[in-house]
Image (cartoon, coloured by chain):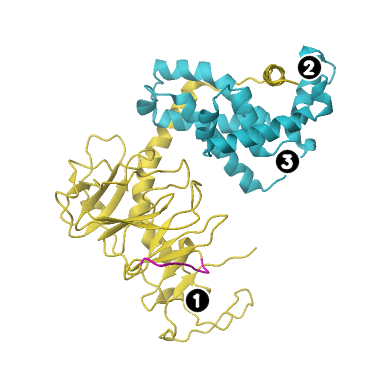
Amino acid sequence: MADTAPDDFVAWVSGAQGPLLRSAFLVTRSEALAEDLVQEAVIKVAARWSRLRAGNPTAYVRTIIHRDHVSWWRRRRETPVADDLERPATYDSDLVERRLLVQDALAQLTRRQRAVIVLRYFDDLTERETAEVMGVAVGTVKSQASAALRRLREHDGLDALRGGEV
Amino acid sequence: MNEADLRRELRRASADISTHADPQDLWESGTRLRRRRQVLVVGGAVVGAAAVAVASVAVQALDTAAPDPPPATTSPTPPDDGNVPLGTVPYVTEGQVQPQFDPADLESVPWDPASAVRSWDPVDPVPLTENPVAHAAVAVQSDYDEPDAITVLGDDGRWRSLDVSDVEFSHSYEYGLGVTRGSLSPDGNQLAIGQTEGVVVVDLTTGEQTTYEVAGLGPRWQGREVFWSPDATTVYVSSTAATPARAIDLTTGETVAVPFEPGASAFLDDGRVVEYHWSQ
């Protein structure tokens, strides 16, 4: 007989899954990989829900997603390039243009820099929380964020988005 | 672009990403994962040594600990298909490599009858330091995410919980820091646990623990699987992307790099190591 998911797990998944997926997408630049990482991580949370439900399952799942992505990346031994971006079929909306522009800028970052930027400025984590998710020192987060922001500022296309104007 | 601009653009760039995964499906997958983990951890602890022996369909023997190892007792005819590189080292056949560990009789282990699956929920464990074992037959980290929750089954059929002090075990979300397939010594008297700073060895007959520092491991989560030599005087640590495999001499505390992967090797009584090689 199938085990029925408890209500608090369903509520947590319903609320957290979307933001987690979008965060993973920004880091991985692949919808398919992001979805795989998030689902695998949520399954791991489900496996120990009795212990996580009273704590912070979202923080736990972020750590799993990050580490699984690092493992995937190491296995693949692939240098990310802009051509890897999953491009939508059409390019005729501002949203798509912005998305491609931001993705192109993120693609100029190292994997670690991209993770720091997304965790700090999309997930709104503190430097310490970001360090815990990534398993690095706070100083590393600071230095990686600084280098990443400097590189993003040097990106010609992103500069045009200042103030919300394309 | 300032930080506020960056936050806004990150949100816009991912706004159309959505998921349709069903929480109920994820929950059922999690339930299956939980049951599989419980069985796997135990299976690794018990069957691991035998698996190493099976894996040692030897293709190359390395002269390591013994400076002048004795020759194999028989001289098999090497295969002539040219696919197996023999080199000039002694050739060892599968039949000459036997398990050094006598796995516990699984049917005799006290199971928790209330468990829905055949999990290894230890029954009424007592602290190890209060009641050490003469020999341990099984070591179990029954919860994958709680590396401190380690129990051992003595050859008297009673469970003990590991209550070592001054050591806070860490773990990995993958590959396992904690009890791994090679953690229990062949004689069942010691438990080795890879950690970020080195290897913690617990004497299960006394409850005393010793930490052997291994440089270069750090907070990374890869590697750190441990394996024992047949005489239980050496613990081997698996390699990582950044560090070689190492051997820790427990009598001197000295650590040296070794040119083989312990997890793909069998350790013979005469000091030779049989490493499994493959090629595509």
When the figure is inspected, residue B274 is found, relative to residue A122, above or below; the finding is below
Quarter containing the C terminus of chain B: bottom right
Q: CA distance from mark 1 to mark 3?
A: 40 Å
Magenta part, dominant SS: loop
Q: Which mark is residue A162?
A: 2
Magenta extent: B253-260
Q: Which residue is mark 3?
A: A80
Position of residue A41 in the picture relative to residue B105 (left or right): right
The image position of residue B208, as x and y in percent, is 23, 55
Rendered hue of chain B is yellow
The image position of residue A23, as x and y in percent, is 61, 25
Q: Which residue is mark 1?
A: B61
Amino acid carrying label 2: it is Arg
The subunit carrying tag 2 is A
**Badge 3 density bin: few <14, some 14–19, many ≥20, Cα 10 Å:** some
Nearest to viewer (mark 3 / mark 2) = 2
Position of residue A100 in the picture relative to residue B79 (left or right): right
**Figure quadrant of residue A156:** top right
**Figure quadrant of residue B79:** bottom right
Instruction: Identify the chain drawn in cyan.
Output: A
Q: Earlier in the sequence, mark 3 or mark 2?
A: 3
Q: CA distance from mark 3 to mark 2?
A: 26 Å
Amino acid carrying label 1: it is Ala
